[in-house]
Image (cartoon, grey):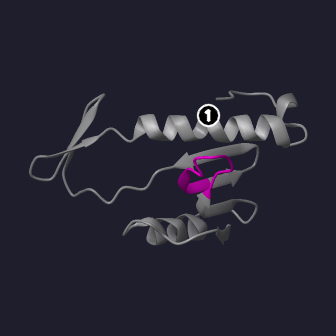
Amino acid sequence: MAQLEVMGAYEGPGEQKTAETLATGLPDSWVVIAGRKLPGANRDDVDLIVVGDNLVFVLEEKSWGPRVIADDSYWIVNDGDRRRNPLDRVGQLARKIAGHLRDHAHGYRQLTGQHV
């Protein structure tokens, strides 16, 4: 079971359930961080950060179902509620986290593999 670190209040209806499910299902060496505010002027909220063996995942939890039709710009939820595609936001947050790791985490620049 992964370690679960809750840094702030859960914002959406599914965040707690998702965080607990991930922590239960992931290896002991992994960490699930919930409700993290990023450093900086905007204090961006990240729903979940999952840190594994040389891996970092940024997750935006959405309890939008049960029916979702996705395209590049908008997702149509349930009976026609149109919402912005959350993938752009996740990409933005991932770049901010990668920049913070690059600037502050010893050894990050020497890691091999794909960096955001």
- For the point 43% across and 34% down, which residue is it? 88
Q: Is residue 19 left or right of residue 98?
A: left
Residue most toward the left? 79
Look at the image and give the residue range highlighted in magenta.
Answer: 37-49
Q: Is residue 82 left or right of residue 20?
A: left
Q: Where residue 66 appears, x then y in whole percent?
A: 21, 58
Q: Quadrant of residue 76?
A: top left
What secondary structure is found at the residue carrying circle 1?
helix
In magenta segment, residue 42? yes
- The residue carrying pointer 1 sits among few (fewer than 14), some (14 to 19) or many (20 or more) residues within 10 Å by Cα, namely some
> Where is mark 1, residue-wise?
95
- For the point 43% across and 56% down, which residue is it? 61
In magenta segment, residue 9? no
Q: Nearer the viewer, residue 63 or 25?
A: 63
Vertical relation: 18 (above or below) 109: below
Q: Is residue 1 at all visible to an observer of this figure?
A: no
